Amino acid sequence: MSKALDGVRILDFTHVQSGPTCTQLLAWFGADVIKVERAGAGDITREQLRDIPDVDSLYFTMLNHNKRSVTIDTKNPEGKQVLEALIQKCDVLVENFAPGALDRMGFTWERIQELNPRMIVASVKGFGPGPYEDCKVYENVAQCAGGAASTTGFDDGPPVVTGAQIGDSGTGLHLALGIVTALYQRTHSGRGQRVLAAMQDGVLNLCRVKLRDQQRLERTGVMKEYPQYPNGEFGEAVPRAGNASGGGQPGWILKCKGWETDPNAYIYFITQAPVWAKICNVIGKEEWATDADYATPAARLPHLKDIFAEIERWTMTKTKFEAMQILNKYDIPCGPILSMKEIAEEPSLRKTGTIVEVDHPTRGKYLTVGNPIKLSDSPTEVTRSPLLGEHTDEVMAELGYSPEQVSALRTAGAI
Ligand code: COA
């Protein structure tokens, strides 16, 4: 079966996490992704957080599936020529170097356009144009600068970063959408263009609801679904809301049976308005369904703390899975707090290809997260990440270099 991006060639100049997640997605959709790395070193994540000596780390393998790896020293004049040949052959160049690195290598937008006017140049940077545009940025810097950290955590504690890699993988997703959009525009414009996804912007996009709340707060001085209401205080900026739902249906994380010893024996419980009567029935507080202080969503807002404490008295008598089973019967929205161990062992995620077991020549078998986006006409087969320079000879041959030329370039340190 053909793949959605069959025939699209990606010159993958990415490293660490944000860029590699983007190009991995494009590879899963069928693009030929040629990852350019430095000989002898490669993407720094190959050796970071290693769990097996001298073997590509899980950090690297889980972000670079379905790609080919070539080694080129792009600061070597002959290496530069190889890169130029690749620029002429590819549709998209993706990079997430520190600001200015591509220009310093001699590959400015103008130069790339000279080489290939159809080339799309896609970049992840920490910040867009402005005071911080020259800064190097990692995940948590973006979470802090994009509004996630100031709005995450509890009111009486410091800002908190989230485990979800919204700065890196989130921005990689944004960039991938920018790339396929630019490829589509090229079908009628005939031209390439630059695509920029700044990590601060990507995080802010995912924190959109908090900018919504900032404006609500400025207008009304209060947000009744936040835990600060009715007894706490609101300041000038959106406060941290603990585990409040962030939407119009109040929710909270509640203890379940076993919470004393199992750090994940919890459930997220949403007091969705249409099923309020059912919630009252399940927890044995039937009178709340008609009591004027509890019967309507607006009436409930000042009592949310008490309501969740009462519901928790019920959830603590059930395991999170028992609670799920009972609540689902009544269409009450809820979700178990799943540990990574539970997720890794979940058969349904294996069945859909969301969790995949991959075999690697030096690492052996390991688990990875497969393509979370399922296309019915373009199924994803996850294949292992490449060894450093595994495809250099193959790609050089495709570029028209003879084996003798390849070995001369190797001796000169260009590849
Ligand atoms: N051949 C020769 N030189 C190469 C090369 C190759 N194949 N690949 C990379 N290099 C060089 C670059 O040209 C650069 O050289 P320069 O500093 O002389 O211009 C150098 O390697 C280092 O690149 P840089 O991007 O600065 O790496 P770093 O390890 O210092 O910084 C980041 C890492 C992630 C902080 C930085 O790349 C960054 O801010 N990227 C943008 C934001 C981002 O994506 N952050 C999230 C990462 S998950």
Image (cartoon, rainbow, N blue to C red):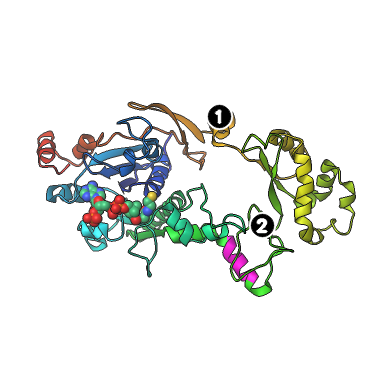
Task: Specify the label residue 314 is tagged with.
Answer: none
The residue to which callout 1 is attached is 345
Q: Which mark is residue 247?
A: 2
Label 2 with label 1: CB-CB less than 8 Å: no
Where 156 sits versus 281, above or below? Answer: below
Examine the residues drawn in magenta and state their main secondary structure.
helix
Please indicate whether residue 116 sits to the left or right of residue 414 in the image: right
Residue 363 image-quadrant placement: top left
Residue 174, horizontal then vertical, whole percent: 45, 54
Q: Which residues are magenta?
A: 209-217
Q: Camera-side residue: 278 or 392?
A: 278
- Crowd around label 2: few <14 · some 14–19 · many ≥20 (10 Å): few
Say whether residue 215 is magenta: yes
Question: Which residue does the image show at 29% across and 42% down from the upper left?
Answer: 34
Q: Earlier in the sequence, mark 2 or mark 1?
A: 2
The residue drawn where x is 36% and y is 46% is 16
Q: Position of residue 202 (x, y in %)?
A: 47, 58
